[in-house]
Image: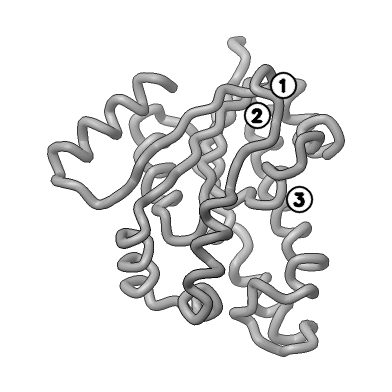
Amino acid sequence: MARPSIIFVIGEAGVGKSAVGKLISQEKKYTYIDKDTATISLTEQYLEECSPTKNKHDRESVFYLGTVRPLEYKTILALALENIELGNNVVLTAGFELEIQDENWLHTNPDIMKIRELADLKVVMVTVDKQTLLNRLIMRNELRDTWKLNNWDAYLKQVAAMKISWNDTDFTNLSFDNSDSLPILYDIKVNNLIKTL
C-alpha cells in the first residue's frame, strides 16, 4: 500500500481555508476534516458553561487558548491519524496559527509525530489581500470575529506575522493566494495548486 499524504490547509480566519480544502479534497478524492465542523458545537457549549466570560464566541481569552483550543487540535489530529491508519489520504483544514510558530512542534507533539510516521505532510498556506479579508469577515457575520473587526489593525499585524517556522525538510510547503479574482483566473489558480499536490 502506498504511503498516504496529509495536507494541512492553514491560514488566519476569513482567508477561505475551508473552501480551498474542500476543492482539494474533491479533486483528489481525499478524506476531508475541518476543525470547525469537528469541534464547534462542543467548543461553544464548553465555553458557555465553563469559561470565566461565559461567552461561547470568545476565541481570544486565556481560557480558550490554554484549555479549549488544545483539545480542539488533539481531536482533529486524532481524526486524521485514524484515517491515515486506514490508508486514507487526508485534507485537514485548521488555522494552526500557534503550532507553525513553534519550530520544534513537528518533533515534540506526540499526535503529529504519529501522523508523520505514517504519512507525508504537505502544507498549503492560504492568504488573501486586506480588502478581501475584510469583506469576507463582514459577509460571514460571525460573532467569533467581533474582536478581529473591532481591533482591525492589531488583527492585520497578527495575519502578517503568520509564518511557518518548521524545518523545510520536514514537509512540503505551498502557498495559495485566495484573494477575490475573476472566476476563470481563480479556476486556473486552483488547478495549478492541485497539480502541485
Give residue 51's quadrant in the image.
bottom right
What number of labels is visible?
Answer: 3
Q: Confirm whether residue 180 shows in the render.
A: yes
Q: Nearer the viewer, residue 78 or 64?
A: 64
Disc 3 crowd, CA 10 A, few/some/many (<14, 14-19, 20+): some
Q: Earlier in the sequence, mark 3 or mark 1?
A: 3
Mark 2 Cα shell of 10 Å, populated few (<14), some (14-19), many (≥20): many
Which residue is drawn at the image coordinates 60% and 42% (left, top)? 163
Left or right side of 82 for 93: left
- Residues under numbered marks 1 and 2 in contact, where contact means CB atoms less than 8 Å apart: yes
Q: Which mark is residue 118?
A: 1
The vertical placement of 74 against 62, above or below, is: above
Left or right: where 169 falls relative to 24: right
Residue 95 pos. (x, y %): 58, 52
Label 3 – label 2 distance at C-alpha: 15 Å
Three-letter code, disc 3: Lys
Rendered position, 11 above or below 71: above
Image spot of residue 30 (x, y percent): 47, 32
